[in-house]
Image (spheres, helix red, strand yellow):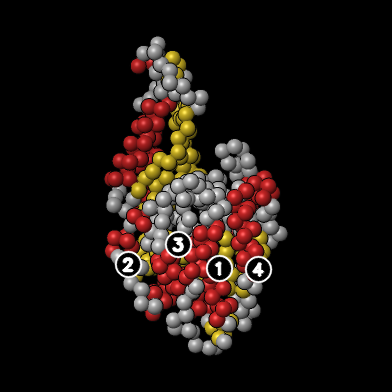
Amino acid sequence: MSEKPSNLPVNSDRLWGTILETAAFGATPKGGVRRLTLSQEDRKVRDWFKAACEAAGCTVTVDALGNMFALRPGRDPSRAPIGLGSHLDTQPTGGKFDGILGTLAALEVVRTLNDAGIETEAPLCVANWTNEEGSRFAPAMMGSAAFVGDFTVENILGRKDAEGVTVKEALEAIGYVGAAPVGSQPFEAFVELHIEQGPILEAENKTIGVVEHGQGIVWYDGHITGFESHAGSTPMPLRRDALATFSQIVLAVEAIARKHGPDAVGTVGEVTIANPSRNVIPGEVNFTCEFRSPHAEILKALEADFAAAVTEIAAGRKGVTVEIEQVWRKDPTHFDPKVIGAIREAAEGLGYSNRPMVSGAGHDAFNLATRMPVAMIFVSCKDGLSHNELEDATQADCTAGANVLLHTVLSLAGVANAA
């Protein structure tokens, strides 16, 4: 086995160019990207990604949920590949970097190794996971969750979006129902590069975040049923107001998260009033809610307090019912010490300032960590802003993250030979 090149860099301009090129698929007027999973925009970027990976000498396979895997052979075919990558779908008002950086940087790692004539001992496998964002279909990180067996393929294929379109129908519509069984692609380890989606690296002027842990997450769907009646002629004591009940729940979520802070957050992100009218008391409201914490005991306390609050609120609202369904739960994630060490060694070897981190956002790496050694690399994003069209990151930071990814992968895969 050859010695790992100590300072081989990725092609910064080529990486940046691919980020800007793919941002055209679903581009928004404010400079962001709207590329909902399994949409026609998603199909276009998937087609681009497949062609780019094949041009880089990879063999691309797609599984039954549309997860994409681009395999670069290694000298030792008996070893499972080192995985790297992220996702290409976005939020409805998403940016150019969330997930996209990790996927395109993984492609750039392959291109850089090709340019340098480097063969790795273990194969490499670049992944694009289906529906990481969860904005069109629930749950988030759907493709990787099914990959590790958290959901059956049949369960996921039957999930519907707000228009009633199933995952199966959406996959068929864009031509990405693959032949490979979900979960059949082996990995020896996996590394995911991502923007931080928070303000810490920027505030501390650090280049690299070495992610050691991830927050636990619990998602709920809520349904409140009251009774629609005239806004002018229904006395206040006789009202069965679904929206007023909902407002109490929103404030309860905020209070519960504050109670268990600072390592807890709670959010009501969506609400829909059925048949809204300015002079009708709302009779039906649907909403979503989530809690997050890096500590298992706090996550359990958040769940218990939320259940108690909903029961109390519903009991105080005569004639109004509140139904809460937990649609997804993920325990806090603890990443693999060996992979964490390889990331830290790569960052320090390249001279990048770094710090240990906990991920506040969820990522496909969280799911994969239940089945294989995994860790993550963070780079800064401007003002910590993400899930927004104004999301931004510098070329220098993206390049630094890709360089750390490259040298982490070389450390894990081993170098067979170099030209």
- Find residue 11 and report its horizontal and vertical position in percent: 50, 73
- Please name the amino acid that badge 1 sits on: Leu
Residue depicted at 60% across the width and 47% down the height: 39
Q: State the residue position of label 2.
A: 206
Q: What whole-number distance in Å separates the C-alpha atoms at marks 2 and 3?
A: 15 Å
Residue 107, label in figure? 1
The residue wearing badge 3 is 194
- First in sequence, mark 4 or 1: give its number: 4
Rendered location of residue 8, percent (x, y) = 47, 80
User: Are the two marked residues, 2 and 4, in contact with CB atoms closer than 8 angstroms?
Assistant: no
Marks 4 and 1, how far apart in space? 10 Å
Dots 2, 3 in contact, CB < 8 A = no
How far apart are labels 2 and 4 at the CA level? Answer: 35 Å
Considering only order in the chain, which callout, 1 or 2, is on the residue closer to the N terminus?
1
Task: Note whether residue 149 is visible.
Answer: no
Q: Position of residue 251 (x, y in %)?
A: 33, 36
Question: Residue 416 location, x and y as percent?
Answer: 57, 85
Between 300 and 221, the one lying in front of the other is 221
Q: Secondary structure at mark 1?
A: helix
Question: As rendered, which of 73 and 242 lies closer to the eye?
Answer: 73
Amino acid under label 3? Answer: His
In the foreground, 60 or 255:
60
Q: Secondary structure at mark 2?
A: loop
Residue beneath disc 4: 54
Secondary element at tag 4: helix
The answer to whether mark 4 and mark 1 are in CB contact below 8 A is no
Give the amino acid type for the residue marked by disc 4 in the picture. Answer: Glu
**Residue positioned most to the top:** 233
Using a 10 Å C-alpha cutoff, classify the residue at mark 4 as few (fewer than 14 neighbours), some (14 to 19) or many (20 or more): some
User: If you read the primary sequence from the N terminus, does the residue marked by circle 3 or circle 4 appear first?
Assistant: 4
Q: Nearer the viewer, mark 3 or mark 4?
A: 4
